[in-house]
């Protein structure tokens, strides 16, 4: 378990994010002024820090790594959820792995699914987030269509087979309890839980860590089929540029064309702040362009 580093400078407290994995570790520090400390505790599984910052609003840190801020979390959650949910013509059953803050669940429910199974190992964190980050879930955990399992997803998901239209993996970085969620065996479990035309979205990581992104993409392709990369700018994160990967067993993870996406958005009556049919395709990475780019392989 990493440690949240808080330092004092001229009577001001700062959180310093220096524990991120990959090539940034030990080479780059990312500092946030703390104007109010909201929560700092250790659950059974992770260290949780929540504080306020003048730029980013309320910031969530787990095991020393920034997870989100109320200023820009909508970018993360819209781009993790809507590309695969709109790519599927009728996503009735959805499983979410992780996502204890509730933001992913909030966005999934906007598509009016029949059932959502959410598996997050840390029940205490789910309660902490609901109390101190209420805008993230926005009441989603009270929805009767939601079944919350506070269990190890690598085991709990094995009880399902050929059931879900969409799987969304919203876990922490590939360290600690989340490391197993980036392995071949887990992606194989996800594949078995999906229907033959199911789609999967995976929170992957920083655009700086090309080796890790390539390794993860290859594992996803082996178990889940064709992939598409989605790149976006999320200011609160250590390098700003972030990659999610979508995969499809039967449907194209690139998604339908702009006109069909617009039609589905109108039919489902979903308004968004960042995702759009145009952004959907503009954010897809087709080939390396700069040293920081990663490619989409299908």
Image: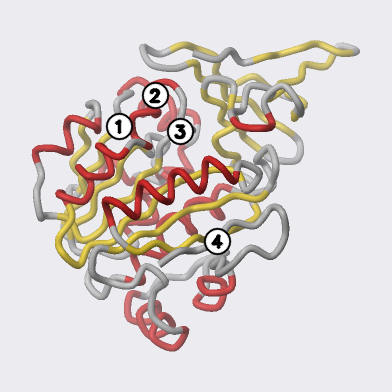
Q: Cα distance, mark 1 to mark 4?
A: 30 Å
Residue ID for mark 4: 295
The numbered mark, 1 or 4, whose residue comes first in the sequence reads: 1
Q: Position of residue 100 (x, y in %)?
A: 37, 34
Which quadrant would residue 126 be assigned to in this image?
A: top left
Q: Cα distance, mark 2 to mark 3?
A: 13 Å
Could you say which disc has been placed on residue 98 in the image? none
Residue ID for mark 2: 125
Q: Position of residue 158 (x, y in %)?
A: 13, 37
Could you say which disc has been placed on residue 172 in the image? 3
| Nearest to viewer (mark 2 / mark 1) | 1
The numbered mark, 2 or 1, whose residue comes first in the sequence reads: 1
| Nearest to viewer (mark 3 / mark 1) | 3
The numbered mark, 2 or 3, whose residue comes first in the sequence reads: 2
Residue at 27% x, 71% y is 251
Residue ID for mark 1: 120
In what element is the residue under mark 1?
loop
Q: Position of residue 184 (x, y in %)?
A: 30, 40
Picture colour scheme = secondary structure
Front residue of 38 and 101: 101
The answer to whether the residue labelled 2 contacts the one labelled 1, judged by CB atoms less than 8 Å apart, is yes
| Nearest to viewer (mark 2 / mark 3) | 3
Which quadrant would residue 43 be assigned to in this image?
A: top left
The mark total stands at 4
In what element is the residue under mark 3?
loop
The answer to whether the residue labelled 4 contacts the one labelled 2, judged by CB atoms less than 8 Å apart, is no
Tell whether 185 sits left or right of 137.
left
Q: Is residue 131 above or below residue 56?
A: above
């Amino acid at each position: 378990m990493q440690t949240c580093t808080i330092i004092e400078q001229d009577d001001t407290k700062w959180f310093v994010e220096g524990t991120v994995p990959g090539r940034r570790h030990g080479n780059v520090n990312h500092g946030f002024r703390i104007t109010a400390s909201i929560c700092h505790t250790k659950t059974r599984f992770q260290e949780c820090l929540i504080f306020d910052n003048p730029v980013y609003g309320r910031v969530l840190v787990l095991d020393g790594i920034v997870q989100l801020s109320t200023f820009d979390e909508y970018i993360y959650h819209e781009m993790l959820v809507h590309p695969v949910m709109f790519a599927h013509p009728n996503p009735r059953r959805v499983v979410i792995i992780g996502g204890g803050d509730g933001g992913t669940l909030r966005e999934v429910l906007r598509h009016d699914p029949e059932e959502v199974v959410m598996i997050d190992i840390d029940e205490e964190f789910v309660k902490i987030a609901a109390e101190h980050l209420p805008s993230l879930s926005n009441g989603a955990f009270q929805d009767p269509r939601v079944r919350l399992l506070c269990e190890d997803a690598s085991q709990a998901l094995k009880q399902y087979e050929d059931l879900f239209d969409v799987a969304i993996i919203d876990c922490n970085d590939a360290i600690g309890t989340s490391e197993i969620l980036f392995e071949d065996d887990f992606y194989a479990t996800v594949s078995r839980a999906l229907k033959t035309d199911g789609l999967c979205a995976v929170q992957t990581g920083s655009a700086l860590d090309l080796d890790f992104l390539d390794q993860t993409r290859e594992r996803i392709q082996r178990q889940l089929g064709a992939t598409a990369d989605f790149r976006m700018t999320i200011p609160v994160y250590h390098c700003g540029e972030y990659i999610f990967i979508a995969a499809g067993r039967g449907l194209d993870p690139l998604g339908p064309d702009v006109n069909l996406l617009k039609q589905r958005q109108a039919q489902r009556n979903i308004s968004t702040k960042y995702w759009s049919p145009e952004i959907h395709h503009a954010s897809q990475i087709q080939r390396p362009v700069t040293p920081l780019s990663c490619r989409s392989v299908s």
